[in-house]
Image (cartoon, rainbow, N blue to C red):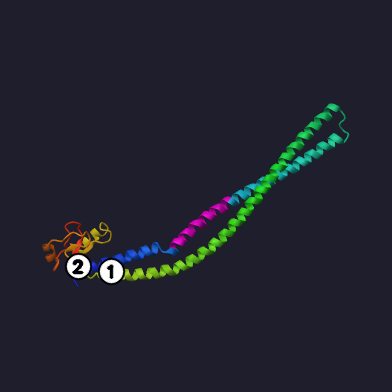
Amino acid sequence: MTDLERLWQLQGLDAELARLRRQRDEHPTWLALQEHRRRLAELEGQLRQCAGAVEQLRRQVRQGEREVQAGHQEVRQLEERLFGGTVTHPKELAGLQQRLERLRAGLQQLEEKVLEQMLALEEQQTRWQALQEQHRSLSGTLADLEQKWQVTEAELAQQEAQLVQRRQELVGSFSDGVWLQRYQRLYEAKGGRPVARVLEGRCEGCGVPVPTLLQEALRKPQRPVVCEVCGRILWLA
């Protein structure tokens, strides 16, 4: 086998490796796994935000209840003064009555506010429980996908290891390093196809006719012969 033939085989192995790596990156299980991880992270963010809202509302409700209790206590004390007979002056009684009315009105507003907070707390707790249920379900699905992907990834990794081993053996069999150097320089620039066959007198890479002198040189190539148009290494199959 000539170095040029080895180069053609190397291109085939590299193409197979690239295909296998694309298959891994585009595998449905891998894509589903990535999507579920993204959704789980997003859901965990929502859970943290919801838990923070629940805790804040709990503090507000507790504070509001304390204020309501203190307000009722103040109302009772004021009623005792107003109706207990200890205050008899009409002007002072009128002042106490006005103060009691303002206090009751403020207390009613406060109770309504606390009730709204309690309803909001109940709503957030319901949402938090629903998010927890989604998290449990998504975590279970994610665990199944991870287990499935481990099997698939191991199979793909084994195939890749075999191809890499074959490639290393092939690279080690070249008699002249100039072929590999030219191949490696062209590989990226030519989209993974640095070697082109000559079919019916034309370069398979660009379709341009290959001069007869170059075709003759390809019969026993001592150095890489390249297409005058696309620059690929030519191989006369």
**Which quadrant is the C terminus positioned in?**
bottom left
Label 2 Cα neighbours within 10 Å, binned few <14 / some 14-19 / many ≥20: many
Q: With respect to residue 125, does 144 lie above or below? A: below
Disc 2 and disc 1 in contact, CB within 8 angstroms: no
Q: Position of residue 120 (x, y in %)?
A: 65, 48
In this picture, residue 60 sits left or right of residue 83: left
In this picture, residue 78 sits left or right of residue 122: right
In the depicted view, which residue is nearer to us: 121 or 89?
121
Q: Position of residue 231 (x, y in %)?
A: 19, 58
Q: Which residues are magenta?
A: 30-49
Give amino acid for label 1.
Answer: Gln
Q: Position of residue 79 (x, y in %)?
A: 83, 37
Q: Residue at x 54, y 55 (%)?
A: 44
Does residue 46 belong to the magenta stretch? yes
Does residue 159 belong to the magenta stretch? no
Q: Which residue is mark 1?
A: 168
In this picture, residue 59 sits left or right of residue 48: right
- CA gap between label 2 and label 1 equals 16 Å
Q: Residue at x 56, y 62 (%)?
A: 137
Q: Residue at x 76, y 34 (%)?
A: 102
Q: Is residue 169 visible in the rendered structure shown here?
A: yes
Q: Residue at x 51, y 56 (%)?
A: 41
In the depicted view, which residue is nearer to us: 70 or 33?
33
Mark 2: which secondary structure?
Answer: helix
Q: Is residue 174 visible in the rendered structure shown here?
A: no
Give amino acid for label 2.
Answer: Leu
Q: Most extreme residue toward the top, as rendered?
A: 91
Residue depth check, mark 2 versus mark 1: number of the one nearer the observer: 2
In the depicted view, which residue is nearer to us: 135 or 28?
28
Checking the image for residue 4, the label placed there is 2
Mark 1: which secondary structure?
Answer: helix
